[in-house]
Amino acid sequence: MSLAELICPAGTPAALRTAVDAGADAVYCGFQDATNARNFPGLNFTPDELAEAVAYAHARGAKVLLALNTYPPAGKVDLWREAADTGAGIGVDAFIVADMGVADYIARTHPGMRLHLSVQAAASSPEAIRYYCEHFGVRRVVLPRILTISEIREIRKEIPCEIETFIFGNHGLMVEGRCSLTNYLTGQSTNMDGVCSPASDVHYVREADGSMSSQLAGFTIDCFGPEEKAGYPTICKGRYRAPHRPEGYYAFEEPVSLNLSRLLPELIDAGVHAFKIEGRQRSKSYVRNVVSAFRRAVDDIRAGREAELADLVALTEGRKQTQGAFETRKWR
Amino acid sequence: MNAGAEFVRRPSFPGQGAIARLACAAVQPFLTHIVRRIAAGHPSLFSRLGPHRQTDYLIDPVELPFALHLRPDPEALIFRAVPRDAAPPAGAAIRGRFLLLLELVDSEVDGDAAFFSRDLEVTGDTEAVVRLRNALDDVDGSIAEETAAMFGPPGRTILNRLRRRYDGDVRGEDKR
């Protein structure tokens, strides 16, 4: 059986302590800049905060993974290199990287450090994954959320590194690390600036009938009826009118969250080493509830018991959840 | 932005006229005391607010007879009760039931989930709201309990009663 480590999100030092106390095996987090894909206002860690967080986690047997999972614009690599140097100096347990240049820098400059390949690298074939392993010494790949469990099982046989899969949280697929929708409307890049739907460009407008419109950079991307559940203000989850669908429809994806709690035994059996919970932008309340629920479930499975599955639908986007591609290829 | 507008999803106290003004005058000394104590106890809270320390927030507990005006500037802190018809122009407004807002301050409830369920409404500058949420979320401990403790056993009793009532309401809604 794989170790089935629980990899948990933290957007603030308090959230990191909450995740560790709730049973995280490792917590992933980022600095307060464009080097990570949750570069949101008021979120993330200063170097001093990260050093304290690493000490807190290590004292309790948990690891800290530093997300450097955005792509430096050409010729502007210093921020990423400095972040890697700072993280190595602090003593983080691994870097989560997407960009080959960042991976190469860390492999050469900090040869003892573990490298995890971010989902943002969108490496979904054995050939792609092996390339990162052979050239940069990647020890773990975070798989894109487009593979079935049987496909994961086959990939596991053909790669020399560990596999991490998402099991809960925001379910934004596209081709991960390649989405340019935010850039198209706002001029800021999800992949280089670390901001998907920057809050400064988001506005919510309440209509007279009680409905609510969500707008990004002045474009209306959805309108929720008075009693309708809402989702994130991201273009990929927007609802649009088109000549063939004048009533409006989800052109890309629906607002829904991934929840693989029922598939944990199969994922472990397929050789998945680590389970990732999405949500560095979420609150301590989310972290506490989701991490403790999955801690119980994983512990039950590892002890040979039937997993106790908590109801987490109240924390899902649009109050809807899916097993996505993990359950069936038809989902695509 | 119409920051003083009435919240539409829940019955709302009008929040204007003589009763609202009387209520504002009655609670103001407590609010001033509370916000100064909280600010002194959690100075790191302000760094996550960045430029929005000078933003005027309107926090609107829909069932109370007044709204709350917050400007989280450590140099000139403002936290005051205002009648809804006299609310200042706000950079950002946050509306919901009083106990929901209190639970959000304490991170007992997830803000995104409350937004998804439409129990929480946000208008105005979304970045200001996100920064305030993240700043509060990084506070260890319970601001609600700290506030209640300032008023001794009666404060704690009132808080516990409010929480029981809110929990009952939430459970009731989930069954519907």
Image (cartoon, coloured by chain):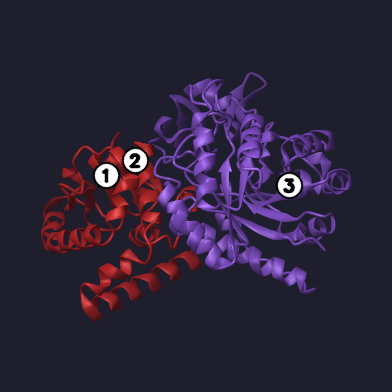
Amino acid under disc 3: Arg
Amino acid under disc 1: Tyr
Left or right of A110 in this view: B61:
left
User: Which quarter of the rendering shows the N terminus of chain A?
Assistant: bottom right
Query: What chain is the purple one?
Result: A
Number of numbered discs visible in the structure rendering: 3
Most extreme residue toward the top is A243
The residue indicated by pointer 3 is A139
Residue A309's place in the image compared with A33, above or below, is: below
Front-most of B174 and A173? A173
Of helix, strand and loop, which one carries label 1? strand
Protein chain holding label 2:
B
Residue A238 horizontal/vertical position (percent): 57, 32
Mark 1 touches mark 2? (CB < 8 Å): yes
Protein chain holding label 1:
B
- Please identify which colour was used for chain B in the image: red
Q: Quadrant of residue A64?
A: bottom right
Of helix, strand and loop, which one carries label 2? helix
Circle 2 packing at 10 Å, graded few (<14), some (14-19), many (20+), is many
Residue A10's place in the image compared with A265, above or below, is: above
The residue indicated by pointer 1 is B57
Mark 3 touches mark 2? (CB < 8 Å): no
Front-most of B75 and B97? B75
Amino acid under disc 2: Ala
Protein chain holding label 3:
A
The residue indicated by pointer 2 is B128
Residues behind callouts 1 and 2 on a single chain: yes
**Can residue A126 be seen at all in this image of the molecule?**
yes
Whole-angstrom CA distance, mark 3 to mark 1, is 46 Å
